[in-house]
Image: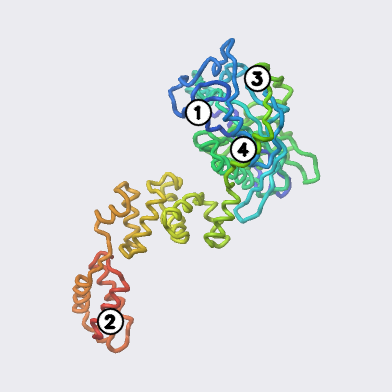
Amino acid sequence: MTSPSRTAVALVDFDEAVRRYDPVLGIEVHVELGTNTKMFDGAPVTFGAEPNTQVTPVSLGLPGALPAVNRKAVESAIKIGLALNCEIAPLCRFARKNYFYPDVPKNFQTSQYDEPIAFDGWLDVELSDGEVVRVEIERAHMEEDAGKNTHVGGHDGRLQGAEYSLVDYNRAGIPLVEIVTRPIPGTGERAPEVAAAYVRTLRDIFRALDVSEARMERGNVRADVNLSLRASADSPLGTRTETKNVNSFRSVERAVRYEVSRQAAVLDAGGLVVQETRHFHESDASTSPGRVKSDAEDYRYFPEPDLVPIAPSREWVEEIRATLPELPAARRRRLDGEWGFAEAEMRDVVNAGALDLIEATVLAGSSPATARKWWMGELARVANAAEVAFEDLAITPAQVAQLQALVDSGRLNDKLARQALEGVLAGEGDPESVAAARGLEIVSDDGPLLEAIDAALAAQPDIAEKIRGGNLGPIGAVIGAVMKATRGQADAGRVRELVLERVQG
């Protein structure tokens, strides 16, 4: 039986919706910080541990347990704020966000409310065609993660219809930074792309700062996508919905598209959009109602009495600023200048997520052009066919560089190199050992080549006469026969030289 919340709804075509309504985005991104211990206690942070083994009395909210702030998490939050061009607060404090849910054992979340550690920032986001959209950052604040509920027996892992629920508190208390944008207007039909590009840009920054693994599939980065529609850019903001915990770039894009089409249908029918949280469903890219969205007053925020305010000194902030690495946008500009790629080529590399891999391949000894050729050509084809990311392929940048070195040295041609690549991807070893085991190296000894040439000329005696007469067209047939006889392991250029020597000498 279909859940009432998943009943099919009429949608307005997306292009028609953005023609008649102005979409306004707002995005809240949560990033789990890569600390060894939790935000307020010494419980370890280990992905994939047995449920409820990474906990302490503080994690479980037991009576009398007192929190203590993780200095490394504060440092990481400051790094993120600086990278997002934010002001760093000279004084900030934690607050209790009160709500009752099984995955919050204290019945409140320790977060920051009116005094975040970073505020008033901005981030330039580059789209697929090079257009840059500036996203205004309202705040970046520290908080702790909740535990994880698992609903057993219900449809699609949801609470409705479940036979029972399990709670794992391993995640409770893991340090988070939440980054909240101001409303992002003026994106029009590109709203889905802007949302996905913004989250991707943040992910790249988190990795560059080394503050998180930032693996969306593990929930290290999660996006809450707010969207509202209004009649025009001059109209007041519409009522927003918040699609919670979207954890892939593609899903962010699809969630925006769906909400634009759904809200347009509601407004067209004379209805009112409900301010609520919504769940995103990967199976059909739809959203469904969660709960009516609470306002800040409903959480009864008040200052956390068990934690003293945080007052990062200007000296400490400047020390942290001095340690910031080259950020992704600046790095792309530098590499583009060093590599000499065309603008469209560099954009394709970035959009494909191959920049890091190509850079690592270049550092391992390959030229930028050949590194790009492998990753954006044969390896992209393999990854697309297998529907996996580049990082999931069983080959390293160093092995790609080694493969190209075999081509550059004349030991393999492109065809043989692709066969060696197949072996590497199949787990047969590195390119050198695969080439040796499969007997792929180019035949460099003229003796076997001359034998194959003589056999080809004997099989087609008229070709020699044509070549002697100045007609070099038929030489291709001889080269083809030699390549077949040597299983593609002959150097076609050398074969051509030897044929001419044989016939004309």
In front of the other: label 2 or label 1?
Answer: 1
Asked if residue 343 lies left or right of residue 263, the reply is: left
Label of residue 61 in the image: none
Mark 2 and mark 1: Cα distance apart in space: 69 Å
Name which residue lies at 28% across and 85% down. Answer: 467
Determine which residue is flagged by label 4. Answer: 320
Asked if residue 267 lies left or right of residue 217, the reply is: right
Position above or below: 307 against 133: above
Mark 1 and mark 3: Cα distance apart in space: 21 Å
Determine which residue is flagged by label 3. Answer: 307
Asked if residue 307 lies left or right of residue 425, the reply is: right
In front of the other: label 3 or label 2?
Answer: 3
In front of the other: label 4 or label 3?
Answer: 4
> What's the residue type where badge 1 is placed?
Asn
Mark before the other along the chain sequence, 1 or 4 = 1
Circle 2 crowding by C-alpha within 10 Å: few under 14, some 14–19, many from 20: some
> What's the residue type where badge 3 is placed?
Leu
Mark before the other along the chain sequence, 1 or 3 = 1
